[in-house]
Amino acid sequence: MKNILIIFSVFFTTLLLVSCNEDLVDKVESGTLKGVVIKKGTNQPLKNVKITTNPTTETVFTKDDGSFIIENIPLGDYSVRAEISGYVTGIQGVNIKSTSQTVSVVFEMADDDSLNSPPSVPTLLSPVDNATEQPVSVDLKWDCTDADTTDILKYRLSVKNDYDANVIEIKDLTDKHYFLENLKYGVNYYWQVSVSDGINPEVNSSVFRFKTTAIPQNRFHYVRKVNGNYTIFSSDEANINFQFSLAGTNSWRPRLNQNAKLVAFLRTVGGNTQLFTAKRDGSSEFQVTSIPVAGFNNAHLNFSWNTNGSEFIYPSFSKLYKINKDGTGLQLLYTTPDGSFISECDWSYDGSKIALKTNDPSGYSSKIIIIDMLGNLVQTILDNVSGAVSGLNFSVDGNSLLYAYDISGHQDENYRRLNSHIFLYSIATATTLDISALSSKPDGTNDLDPRFSPNDASVILTNTSNDGISQKNIISIMLQDNERTDLFPDAEMPDWE
C-alpha cells in the first residue's frame, strides 16, 4: 500500500509540472520585426549590414535590397542595432506589443567620415615654378591623389598678379588642369590649387610663380567679327596674334602710332562712336573724345594720328575736329561748305595737309579733297562720283594718296560694291594708277581699305567677294611687280605701322 501511494504521488507531481509548463509556453507571445537599411543622402540599399537586438534575439544580415526580418521576437522593448564597416552604427528603439504586430524600421546610415583619408597635397606641374616667357594663354596643370577612390575631388584655382588687385578664382574644377586666357604681357602671376573631397578640410598646394612674355612689338592690327561685334587683333607677319580689344565690345579701325606707343581705335559707347587709345597689349584704355565720331555708317568712319602721336583729327558729320590724345584742346578745323558728311580723313606725315572723303547721308555723291591746316582747298581728286568711295592714306612723303573706288558706279541702299579697285593718286602730276587692275584683282571681288606699308613699297588691303556676305581677307600688293600675297584670313580693316 505504501508503494502504491508513492507511485501515485510521483505521477501526480509529474502531471502537475507538465500542466504548469504548458501554461508558461502559452504565455510567451512574440511578434515580427522587419526593416530596410539605406545609405543616407542617396537612398542606396546597403547589403550585408549586421542587425542585432538588445535584449538579444536573432542576428541577421540585410539582403541585396537592404531588407531584413526577425520573426518570433518576444513582446517587449528592444534597441535594434545596424552596423557595417565604413558607416556610422545606427541604433533605433522599437516596442513589440502583440503577436499580430509587425514593426518596421528604416535605417539611414551615414558614411563614417572618421575613416576617410584626406586628398594628397596637390602637386603643381606646369608651368614650373619661376617659369618665364610664358604665353598670355597658359594651360595650368597639377596632380593629386586620394586613397578613398570613391571620393569626388573638386579643385579651386586661385591666381593673383603683381600688376593689379585682380584675383582670378575658379571653383569646382574636376579636371587636373585649367586653360587660363587673356593674361597681360610682362606680368608675374602667382597660382595655387586647393582640393576638397567634400569630407575633410580643404588641402592647399604650394604657390608657384610664372611670368608672361614681354609685350610683342606687333606692327599689324586688324579686325574680325566675334559674336557679332568688331574685335581688334594684334599680330606679327606670321599671324601669331592675340585679341587686343575687350570681348563684348564693338571696336574697330585700329591705328598704331609708334611714337606714342599706343593703338587708337573706334568703339561704340552708349549708341555713339568714340575714339579710344590703349597700350599695345590692349590695357589702359582711354576715351579721347566726348563729341562723338559721326558720319555715314559707323563701319566706314575713320580718323588719323599726327606723326608724333600727340593729336588726332576726326570727323563728326560735316565738321572736322582736332584733339589732343589726352582729350584736351578740342578745336574745329573745317566745316564742309555744302553740309555733306565727312566720313574719312588722313593727316600727312609732315602735318601740312589733310585728305578728306565726303559724301551725302546715303554714302554717295562722294568727293576726295585735300585741304591745308587753315581749311583752304588745295586739290580735288574726286568730285561727286557715282558709286562707293573709301580708304584714304598718304604716302610718307605726302606725294601720293591711296583710295578705293567702285568703278562700276553701282549704288543701292545697302551700300553694296560690285567692283571696287585700289587707286594710287599722284598729287604732283594729278594722275591715277589702278593698282587692282595691274595686280589682276580676281573678278567678282572688291579691294577695300588700302594702307601703305611703312616703307611705301607695298599696299595692304582687304579683298572679298562682291556678294557682301563672304569672308574678308587681308592681302598685300607689291608696287614694284604688282604681286598679290595673302596675309591674314578672315580679317579686315588692316593697319601696318
Image (cartoon, rainbow, N blue to C red):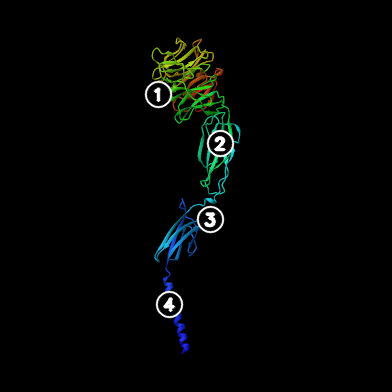
Q: Which of the marked residues, 3 or 2, is nearer the chain's N terminus?
A: 3
Local packing at callout 3 (Cα closer than 10 Å; few below 14, some 14-19, many 20+) is few
Which of discs 3 and 1 lies nearer the camera? The answer is 3
Look at the numbered disc 4 and give the secondary structure of its residue: helix
Which of discs 1 and 4 lies nearer the camera? The answer is 4
In the rendered image, the vertical position of residue 126 relative to residue 383, given as above or below: below
Look at the numbered disc 3 and give the secondary structure of its residue: loop
Please name the amino acid that badge 4 sits on: Ser
Separation of disc 3 and disc 2 at Cα?
A: 40 Å
Q: Which of the marked residues, 3 or 4, is nearer the chain's N terminus?
A: 4
In the rendered image, residue 381, in percent from the top left (x then y), is placed at 46, 13
Measuring 45% from the left and 82% from the top, which residue is drawn there?
A: 11
Taking depth in this image into account, of 413 and 443 the one nearest to the observer is: 413
Find residue 85 and name its label.
3
Q: Name the residue under label 2.
A: 191
Taking depth in this image into account, of 19 and 105 the one nearest to the observer is: 19
Q: Which of the marked residues, 1 or 2, is nearer the chain's N terminus?
A: 2
Find residue 19 and name its label.
4
Q: Are marks 1 and 2 in contact (CB under 8 Å)?
A: no
Q: Mark 1 points at which residue?
A: 414
Q: Which of the marked residues, 3 or 1, is nearer the chain's N terminus?
A: 3
Please name the amino acid that badge 3 sits on: Ser
